Amino acid sequence: MRINNVVKITGLAAAGLLALTACGATTAGSTTGGSEPSSSSSVAASPSASASPLASTSSEGAGTSSGSYTVAAWALPISESGDKLGTIKGESFSVDIYQVATDVASKDSMFVDKETKENLLKKGAPIVYLNYVVTNTSSADIPLSHSLITPSAKYADWKYLGGMPSDSSSDGYKKHGLSSTGTKLKEEAPFVLKPGESFNVAENFGYASGKETEISATMTPATADGKLDHDKKQSANTTVTLK
């Protein structure tokens, strides 16, 4: 197994090197799709602020209907725009995967190749937005922490541990009617996802049409005191092909 090194740069100064190991593992789970590789060592560049959620309102009571989904009371409205690429099917949850839009990165990412010094996602590089609609398919409530059930994508031949770089600017998410958090402002955990209810959360990464992409999702429910119940952790995955 090859070892790839990643360096993190804060502002204009190098803060050090982060060792990343070449990866290619797939997670347990289910259904359709495809993904693509990336190569050589990478370096992390100046930190970027996390994308903020869509404008939100306070929530009370039962979930509301949004297209073919029933939105959890604490969740933001669900977007069904874009092309549906596939579905992850876990033991008690499912994730519908939508390719919503392509755009360009608003700034350089945090990661650069250690050997070539090339940024892995440069400003102006094409990116793609995927939206994940998570649904409780069981007959019991699923109490979730702030980590929710957050799917993540990785090209099948991606060689760095830690996932793929993205454009963290909140403007891009807002532009395409998406959210990187999934919850309304001022909502507090536990976020109870009732049977049949859904929420959505989005991400972006470097875009290459026709690439097979592995998407994995892990659900770790919260206990009554708000801690994660690792004994009930569930994972599932699938592979889709970007359009």
Image: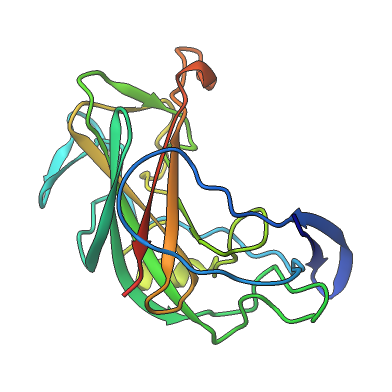
Task: Locate residue 191, reporting x and y percent.
Answer: 37, 29
Up-down relation of residue 124 to residue 78 (above or below)? below
**From where the camera sits, is residue 3 visible?**
yes
Left or right for 73, reference 217? left
Residue sticking out furthest to the bottom: 124
Left or right for 166, reference 133? right
Task: Locate residue 177, reporting x and y percent.
Answer: 30, 66
Residue sticking out furthest to the top: 224
Work out which quarter of the rendered image holds the N terminus and state it.
bottom right
Q: Looking at the image, what colour scheme do you see?
A: rainbow
Up-down relation of residue 111 to residue 236 (above or below)? below
Left or right for 156, reference 88? right
* 58 and 234: which is toward the camera: 234
* 238 and 152: which is toward the camera: 238
Picture residue at 43% right of the left edge, 42% below the top: 217
Q: Quadrant of residue 81?
A: bottom left
Up-down relation of residue 231 to residue 214 (above or below)? above
Picture residue at 45% right of the left edge, 12% below the top: 224
Task: Locate residue 124, reporting x and y percent.
Answer: 54, 87
Work out which quarter of the rendered image holds the C terminus and state it.
bottom left
Picture residue at 37% right of the left edge, 48% below the top: 182
**From where the camera sits, is residue 151 visible?**
no
How many numbered badges does the structure rendering display?
0
Picture residue at 21% right of the left edge, 35% below the top: 197
Task: Locate residue 174, reporting x and y percent.
Answer: 37, 67
